[in-house]
Amino acid sequence: SDFIGAAALGWGVRSGVRPPDAEHPHGHARAEPIAALIVAVLAGVLSAEVLRSAVTALVSGARPNLDWPLATVFAVKVAFKSAAALRARSILRQGHNPVMAALLVDSRNDVLVGCTALIGFALARAGLFLIDPLLAIATAIYIAYAGLQLGRENVSLLLGENAAASRRQELAALAARVPGVLEVRDVVALWHGTRLRVQLTVRTDGQLSLNEAHVFGHRVEQHLCGEPDVAHVMVHVEPL
């Protein structure tokens, strides 16, 4: 699960930064949410497997394997994945990034599984064998929930969901700062992978010539394209 998830995220990062070409004129930004969606599916598979194993152990009364080398592996993994989660969280503070969000969920799941295993190990050595499968069931439910949330977010990105109303209002306010803009309306900002494709109408002096209106619209486009989450802007200029 870790190997496939890491390979998918690596592919998403490498493909997502490729420039537009003849076959993909809008770029390859959707590679990242596709990779994140793969991680979400793997989280669902992992939760189902953990739940199956835990229920089987609970019904059969099986005792956990108290193997010190295995416990050491879990401890090392918890440390490594904690560092990965902290790094992913730090990058996410800088802006929207499906791959880092998926890495955060994946790392957080692994930390939870590892910590649960170590707690179950310690309690089992104390003779409380029943606690181990109960902890695993709770962990499986959490992983399934996290995977579902991650999947929903990235399906929305792939389907071209409109940006939040607050972000559209911010883009409208930015456009309104361009000299000559008298009114901004009909702002649409659709997610294309990790970045936005913005369409809006700006109203200005109706006495402008065609050349002046063209330059004016281009100025608004350039102003909005300076935003890190904006990939493309289409401006419709109307006379007021």
Image (cartoon, rainbow, N blue to C red):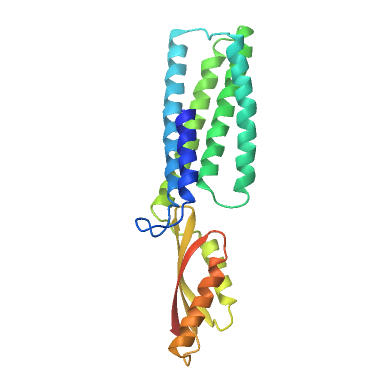
| Residue 119, image x, y percentages | 62, 18
Q: Is residue 157 above or below residue 215?
A: above
Q: Position of residue 52 (x, y in %)?
A: 42, 20
List the single residue furthest toward the left. 23
Q: Position of residue 190 (x, y in %)?
A: 44, 60
Residue 153 seen in render: no
In this image, 201 relative to 178: left or right? left
Give whichever of 214, 106 is nearer the camera: 214
Instruction: Give percent across and percent down for residue 186.
Output: 44, 72
Q: Is residue 38 left or right of residue 132?
A: left
**In the displayed structure, would residue 41 be above or below residue 183?**
above
Q: Is residue 160 above or below residue 175?
A: above
Q: Residue at x 60, y 24 (%)?
A: 77
Outermost residue, bottom side: 207
Q: State the image quarter where residue 120 is shown.
A: top right
Q: Residue at x 62, y 42 (%)?
A: 89
Q: What residue lies at 45% left-to-right and 52% top-to-bottom?
A: 29
Residue 105 can be seen, yes or no: yes
| Residue at the (51%, 31%) spot, across then down | 142
